[in-house]
Image: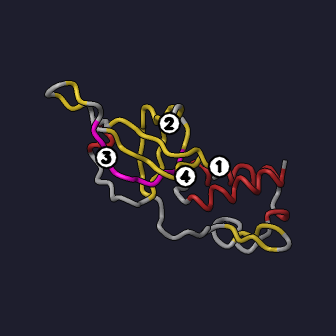
Amino acid sequence: MIKIFATFNGCKRGPSNGAYLGPPSLIWGNVTDADGNPIGDMTSNKSKITESKVFRKGNRYILECSEATDNKIKRIKTINAVRKENSCNLFKDSNKGFKMINGKYKNKYVSDIPKKDLTNYLTWVRENSNNEVTLSNISKIVKQLY
């Protein structure tokens, strides 16, 4: 399963076959992967998961799916809204490096935390966070460590 972030841009109907309009598709814009790399605009078919949610046009969502290729998001497993605030609530970037401003290692610099403990903590946060900026900061920290 992969996590991607996307902005909901509305719905569209598929091509019509006589009296039948094709299945509706959800249009997703500004799609990025968990590291913040842009993927582009994509579509996904409606499913039981997407039918049970109310989407607001322009809002950002995190989608967990099996694959996202050829401008199609396939087999969506979960959809959650992303925080509207565009800031990280765990890390602060400074001249000395990243400083923890919340959580288990509050007021410590990333360089002061044992590598094994930091790796375990970052893995846990990455799996459980829906904050796009926090996830991109985790990617930056991992690139600095390794």
Q: Say if 105 sits above or below 145 in the image.
A: below
Disc ID at residue 11? 3
Dot 2 or dot 3: first in sequence order is 3
Q: Is residue 139 left or right of residue 124?
A: right
Q: Counting residues from the N terminus, which is met first, the one under dot 1 or under dot 2?
A: 1
Q: Report the amino acid beneath label 1.
A: Asn
Question: Where does the image place residue 49, in percent across and percent down from the top left?
Answer: 32, 40
User: Picture quarter containing residue 22?
Assistant: top left
Can residue 26 be seen in the rendering of this structure? yes
Q: Amino acid at mark 2?
A: Asn
Question: What is the distance, in whole Å, between disc 2 and disc 4 at their CAs?
Answer: 26 Å
Whole-angstrom CA distance, mark 1 to mark 4, is 20 Å
Residue at position x 27%, y 45% in the image:
52
**Pair 1/2: label in front:** 2
Quarter of the image with the N terminus is: top right
Pick whichever of labels 2 and 4 is earlier in the sequence. Answer: 2
Residue at 40% in and 53% down: 8
Q: Which residues are magenta?
A: 4-13
Q: Amino acid at mark 4?
A: Asn
Q: Tell me: 108 left or right of 31.
A: right
| Residue 133 spot, x, y in % from top left | 61, 62
Is 11 inside the magenta-drawn segment? yes
Q: Which residue is at the far front?
A: 18
